[in-house]
Amino acid sequence: MGGARNIRRFLEQFGPRGLNLGLAGLCDAGEEGDFRRGLEWAGLGSDLGRAEMEALGFYVCVADLEDELIRCLGAAAVEQVVEAQGELGSFRTFQRQPAWRARPSQEQLRRFIGTHSGRKIRYARLLVDALELTSVPRPLDRVVG
């Protein structure tokens, strides 16, 4: 979509005013307002809360998709994915930075994944591939289910 703020354009094209297709979506907690306003603008409800958004097929990640995936997999499994990508050394260097030393591994991994352009998209796919089907994060499970 190119960002949550583009939700209106997609809802206009594919929603009730456009092709009238069945829609579903996933957003980060920080983008929830953009999604809510877009859904309301498209005529899919008013004063939408999370439950109403979910009834429409739109789910909110606790922080973001990476956070959901890291929590489900656990830090050790995510580090294995980072190692398989040849970036474990870079991650260890990142962990030694004063601002990140005392933070939990999950927070460090989430920030590390978000530090380079394209890394979030690449790691999202890799982390999803590493998931067991029994431990898919709820928002992801619901949006594709």
Image (cartoon, helix red, strand yellow):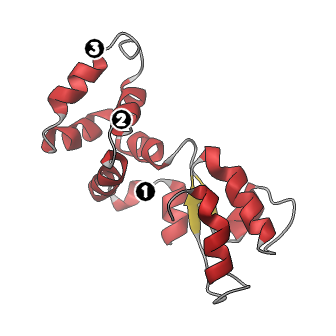
Percent position of residue 56, x then y? 70, 71
Q: Mark 1 points at which residue?
A: 136
Would you call the spot at circle 1 few (<14 residues within 10 Å), some (14-19), or many (20 or more)? Answer: some
* Residue type at numbered disc 1: Val
- Cβ atoms at labels 2 and 1 below 8 Å apart: no
The earlier-in-sequence mark between 3 and 2 is: 3
* Residue at image mark 3: 96
- Dot 1 lies on which element? loop
Q: Which residue type carries mark 2?
A: Thr
Question: Is 35 drawn above or below residue 68 in the view shown?
Answer: below
Direction right: furthest residue = 47
Question: Is 101 situated left or right of 62 in this image?
Answer: left
State how far apart marks 1 and 3 are (Cα).
Answer: 31 Å
Asked if the residues shown at circle 1 and circle 3 are in contact, with their CB atoms under 8 angstroms apart, the answer is no
From mark 3 to mark 2, how far is it between C-alphas? 15 Å
Which callout, 1 or 3, points to the residue nearer the camera? 3
> Residue at horizontal 27%, vertical 34%?
76
Which x, y percent locates residue 90?
A: 20, 28
Instruction: Label 2: state its secondary structure.
Output: loop
- Nearer the camera: disc 3 or disc 2: 2
Residue 121 x, y percent position in the rendering: 35, 53
Residue 38, quarter of the rendered image: bottom right
Q: Is residue 21 above or below residue 26?
A: below
Q: What element does badge 3 sit on?
A: loop
Give the residue displayed 35% in from the left and 44% down from the top: 73
Q: In which quarter of the image is residue 62?
A: top right
Relative placement, left or right, of 11 versus 82 is right
20 shown above or below 92: below
| N-term-proximal mark, 2 vs 1 | 2
Answer with left or right where residue 126 lies relative to residue 19.
Answer: left
What's the mark number on residue 115?
A: 2
Q: Residue furthest top?
A: 98
